[in-house]
Structure formats: C-alpha cells, structure tokens
Image (tube, rainbow, N blue to C red):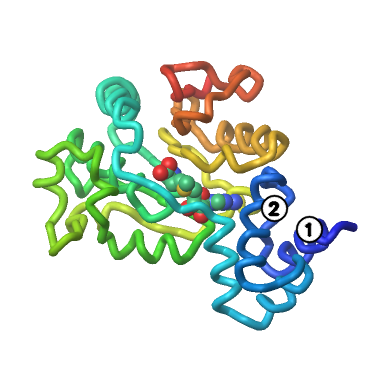
Amino acid sequence: MSDYQQFIANVKRKTGIDLALYKEAQMKRRLTSLYEKKGFKNFDEFFRAMNHDQALFHEFLDRMTINVSEFFRNAKRWEVLEKKIIPKLLEKNKRLKVWSAACSTGEEPYTLAIILSKFMPLSQVSVLATDIDDNAMARAKLGIYMERSLQEVPEDVKKKFFVKEGSHYKIIDDIKRTVTFKKHNLLADPFDTNFDLIVCRNVLIYFTEEAKHELYLKFNRALRPGGIFFVGSTEQIFNPAAYGFEVEDTFFYRKM
Ligand SMILES: C[S@@+](CC[C@H](N)C(=O)[O-])C[C@H]1O[C@@H](n2cnc3c(N)ncnc32)[C@H](O)[C@@H]1O
C-alpha cells in the first residue's frame, strides 16, 4: 500500500472521511503541499503528528475542504431560480422543503432564503444547510462577510438584508433564523427525503466519477417527483436520464 493509500485508510478510521472518493491527483497535491510546508517528509509522518495535534488536524480539514463561496454565485443562474424554477415549484406546493448541501460559510443558503422571502413571509421560509466542515458552518452561523463575498449582490438586496459594520457586512437576523445548519457528510451520511429543491454546487467537482454517480442517485431519491436539483456552473450532468432526471434549464434538473 502506498504512503497516500495508507493515509487514506488512517484518515477514514479516525474521521469517517473517505479521501478515496475525492479526485486523487488534486487532493494529493493539496495535502502534500500542506505537509511539506509543515516540515514533514511523507503522509505517514504527517498523520502521526496530526493524530496528537488538534490544531494540525484542523489545518488538514481546512485544506481538504475548499470553502470558497459567494452570495448569488453565478448570478444569472439564481435569476433563473427566482424567475422560473421557484414559481413553478410553488404551483404544486405552497411550502417548499429546501436543502443547501455543502453550504460552506453560508452564502448559498442565505441567498436561497433571500430569494424565497420574495415569495412568502419569512416565517414560512426554511432552509436546511449542511456541510462536512464545522469551522465553515461556525462562520456561517456568525453571518459576517467581507465585501468581496457580496460582489454579485444587487444594491437593493444589500440594503434590505445586510447591515454594514465597518468593512464587513452582517446578514440580518430575520434571514439568519430561517436557516438550520447541520453537519453532514455527503459521502457517508443518510439523506433526508421529500425535498422540493436541492442546491449542491461546487463540491461534486472534487469527487471521483464513481462517487458522483452514487450521489446523483441519492439526490434523486431525496427529491419529491418534480423536485429540482441545482448544480454548479461546471457541474453539468452528462446523462441525466440515467439518474432519473430531465433537464429543466442549464444546471437545473427535474426529478422525473
Ligand atoms: C467550494 S465550497 C462550495 C460552497 C457553496 N456550495 C458554493 O457553491 O458557493 C465546497 C464545500 O464542500 C464541502 N465538502 C467537501 N466534502 C464534503 C462532503 N463529503 N460532504 C459535505 N460537504 C463537503 C466543503 O467543506 C466546502 O465547504
């Protein structure tokens, strides 16, 4: 077994995270640059050290989860969600069950809540937001962002849903309250069901083809018939019918 394979086995035993389901070249490169920076010679040394050193373990987690996010990321797609997808979903159900999977630092679930608030009172808006990374979700719960996370946010939305605090922006409590954050590993934990809308963007690209196939099927099962699966702008599904989906719009798939 190679040094990296042994590391994968050790990490899986320690954390339940299966690095074998992430694209190898990319993940290995990211982690190698971290252990080299820390002065270790190989994965074995690195694992032994992080087994005793909580701070190093967190640096490892931080390096393997890539947390970049943004409000209204790829704004045109969110426009399609608002103008076309949500109105159609609301024709069937007045209350929507919505999941932001791999939500990182919260920009995505809060964007969802902001859009949903245009259709219903905030008391009826409810978004489940999950991620494998506790640190990212702790920041999400704080809800404080740098200006660059808001570059796609329209001015009126900025005024209505954020409070400027020095050089930062804080999401208002009324929006915050609508989002429930939970730790969840997409590659290991069971999925809830009966969702009208699942947003899972910019994480599937890190997974192996096999892991992605499995996940498309699981997302399909987690949706109601007619429910929508919204993916990232590099994450087109090449054969949606194989997973029980049809194309609703670019990067939106409807459960058949
Ligand atoms: C690049 S961010 C995407 C954030 C947001 N969805 C967006 O598009 O802006 C990727 C997120 O996936 C999370 N992630 C990585 N592996 C995961 C897994 N197995 N289960 C759940 N989340 C995972 C990371 O912690 C990170 O927060």
Residue sitting at x 68%, y 59%:
32
Classify 172 as above or below 78: below
Where is residue 56 drawn, in percent x and y? 59, 75
Q: Position of residue 83 (x, y in %)?
A: 25, 22
Quarter holding residue 61 = bottom right
Mark 2 nearby-residue class (10 Å; few <14, some 14–19, many ≥20): some
Q: Does residue 188 appear left or right of residue 59 in this picture?
A: right
Q: Amino acid at mark 1?
A: Tyr
Please give left or right for residue 26 compared with residue 96 in the image: right
Badge 1 marks a residue whose secondary structure is helix
**Where residue 102 appears, x then y in whole percent?**
48, 48
Residue under label 2, please give it: 28
Residue lying farthest bottom?
Answer: 52
Residue drawn at the location 57% of the way across and 31% of the way down: 220
**Which of 224 and 119 lies nearest the eye of the viewer?**
119
Nearer to the camera, 206 or 187:
206
Disc 2 is placed on an element classified as helix
The three-letter amino acid code for the residue at tag 2 is Lys
* In the image: residue 205, left or right of residue 146: right
Q: Give the residue displayed 30% in from the left and 43% down from the top.
A: 71
Q: Is residue 102 above or below residue 36?
A: above
Per the image, the residue denoted by label 1 is 4
Q: Quadrant of the N terminus?
A: bottom right
Instruction: State the separation of the CA atoms marked 2 and 1.
Output: 8 Å
- Is residue 217 visible in the rendered image? The answer is yes
Disc on res. 204: none
* Label 1 Cα neighbours within 10 Å, binned few <14 / some 14-19 / many ≥20: some
Q: Is residue 90 visible?
A: no
Mark 2 lies within 8 Å of ligand 1 (Cβ measured): no
Q: Earlier in the sequence, mark 2 or mark 1?
A: 1
Task: State the image quarter where residue 72 is shown.
Answer: top left
Residue at 13% over, 64% down: 166
